[in-house]
Amino acid sequence: MAIFTILSTTLLSLFAVAIYINLEKKLYSDIDGFLRTTAVSLSDSIETVWENEKSKSDKIINSKSLDETINQYFFKLIKSWTSVEFGNPRYFNILAHIFDSNLELIAASNKGYKDIIPLSIKEKESMRLGEYFFNYNVETQKDKYLSLRFLSTPVTIDQNFTYVIRI
């Protein structure tokens, strides 16, 4: 009887571990898919708004000074759009950061997290190489970590690295 109990306990334990591992992989996969979809959605929305504004300004400004205007106006547009779009309650638990081509923060959906989650060195290297980057733990202070899953993805416009979206 004792052998049966030990064997049953061992089999059930192994089964529970297998279920746990599979569930963990599935949940991470779902979160990663959600983060990718949200980043693409945000990028598409910014591009749509930007193209609309750019077409309006094309009519007013000559093409030579348009590039200068774009550089100045683009960041103002992103800041404005991010604060309006991510003010929606369905995005309450989502942090969105947008960094410029110099990897400086230009917009954040939640003002409180601007300073505690800077881009890491590995993240900056990935952005410059044009690769997306998943992170799990963020160092907020020396030897203090915040467990947080996020995706950083570079966005290119006309083959030029333009900005980074972190969701």
Image: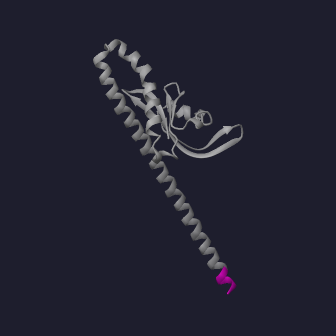
**Residue 93 position (above or below residue 131):** below
Looking at the image, which residue sits at the far left? 59
Q: Toward which corner of the image does residue 156 lie, by quadrant?
A: top left
Q: Point out residue 70 in the picture as x, y percentages from the top left corner.
A: 39, 20
Chief secondary structure of the magenta portion:
helix
Q: Toward which corner of the image does residue 110 lie, by quadrant?
A: top right
Q: Toward which corner of the image does residue 116 lie, by quadrant?
A: top right
Left or right for 120, reference 55: right
3 part of magenta stretch = yes
Looking at the image, which residue sits at the far bottom? 1
Between 156 and 15, the one lying in front of the other is 156
Q: Point out residue 109 in the picture as x, y percentages from the top left corner.
A: 51, 37
**Residue 28 position (above or below residue 150):** below
Left or right for 43, reference 1: left
Query: In the image, what residue occupies the spot 49% across and 27% down?
Result: 100
Q: Point out residue 31 in the picture as x, y percentages from the top left corner.
A: 49, 51
Between 87 and 130, the one lying in front of the other is 87
* The N terminus lies in quadrant: bottom right
Query: In the image, what residue occupies the spot 64% across and 44% down?
Result: 146
110 part of magenta stretch = no
What is the total number of numbered labels drawn onto the structure image?
0
Q: Point out residue 129 in the picture as x, y percentages from the top left corner.
A: 49, 31
**Residue 84 position (above or below residue 60):** below
Query: In the image, what residue occupies the spot 42% across and 38% down?
Result: 42
Highlighted magenta segment, given as a residue range? 1-5
Query: In the image, what residue occupies the spot 46% across and 35% down?
Result: 82
- What kind of colouring is applied to the model shown? one colour
